[in-house]
Image: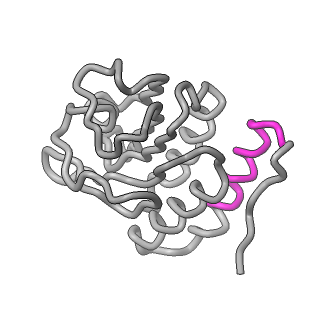
Amino acid sequence: MFDFRPDPATPKPEAYRQLLDAAEALTAGEPDAVANMANIAALLWDFLPDLNWSGFYRVIGDELVLGPFMGRPACIRIPMGQGVCGAAARDGRTQLVEDVHSFPGHIACDSVTNSELVVPVLRDGATVAVIDLDSPAKARFDRDDANGVEALARMLADRI
């Protein structure tokens, strides 16, 4: 049984260092991308407070296709460039959105989501997936969250 949860008083950069260590332990030596994404979606869900969704969208052709996640049912396919996830995948850049309702072209898969952090997973310069975190709280995510999830995405690039 794994229990990787940090103490709630842990400073955010240290919590993300612990999350990265846990992700390394869970995925090291496992060649199955789906298994790795599933464990990381669950780890993010367990590790980070105030989320209503954590998971992956995979790049397949010119769209994003739902991957392993934790939370309510989600949009299955997102056209490249559409919404927060599509923008992150198309541009290969993190999208840190304090209020999704002000994001042009936002796709509302879950009406309770108010803020979102989407980080592309890049392999050889191309986006292969995105890590998507949603919260019902506005401005839930900050630069520390982005830095932590970006480090996770770099570590996962060859494991998913």
* Main secondary structure found in the magenta portion: helix
- The quarter of the picture where the C terminus appears is bottom left
In x, y percent, where is residue 53? 46, 51
Residue farthest to the front?
A: 112
Q: Quadrant of residue 139?
A: top right
Q: Is residue 35 left or right of residue 65?
A: right
Q: Is residue 141 above or below residue 102?
A: below
Q: Residue at x 53, y 68 (%)?
A: 39
Q: Residue at x 48, y 52 (%)?
A: 54
Judging from the image, the colouring scheme is one colour
* Residue 16 is a magenta residue: yes
Q: Is residue 127 left or right of residue 33?
A: left
Q: Residue at x 44, y 30 (%)?
A: 94
Q: Is residue 69 left or right of residue 86?
A: right
Name the one closer to the observer, 32 or 95: 95
In x, y percent, where is residue 4? 74, 63
Q: Residue at x 17, y 46 (%)?
A: 63
Q: Which residues are magenta?
A: 10-23
In x, y percent, where is residue 105? 22, 25
- The quarter of the picture where the N terminus appears is bottom right
Q: Is residue 95 left or right of residue 40?
A: left
Residue farthest to the bottom?
A: 1
In x, y percent, where is residue 10? 84, 43
Q: Is residue 44 above or below residue 139?
A: below
Q: Is residue 73 above or below residue 120?
A: below
* Residue 135 is a magenta residue: no
Q: Quadrant of residue 31?
A: bottom left
Name the one closer to the observer, 45 or 67: 45
Q: How many marks?
A: 0
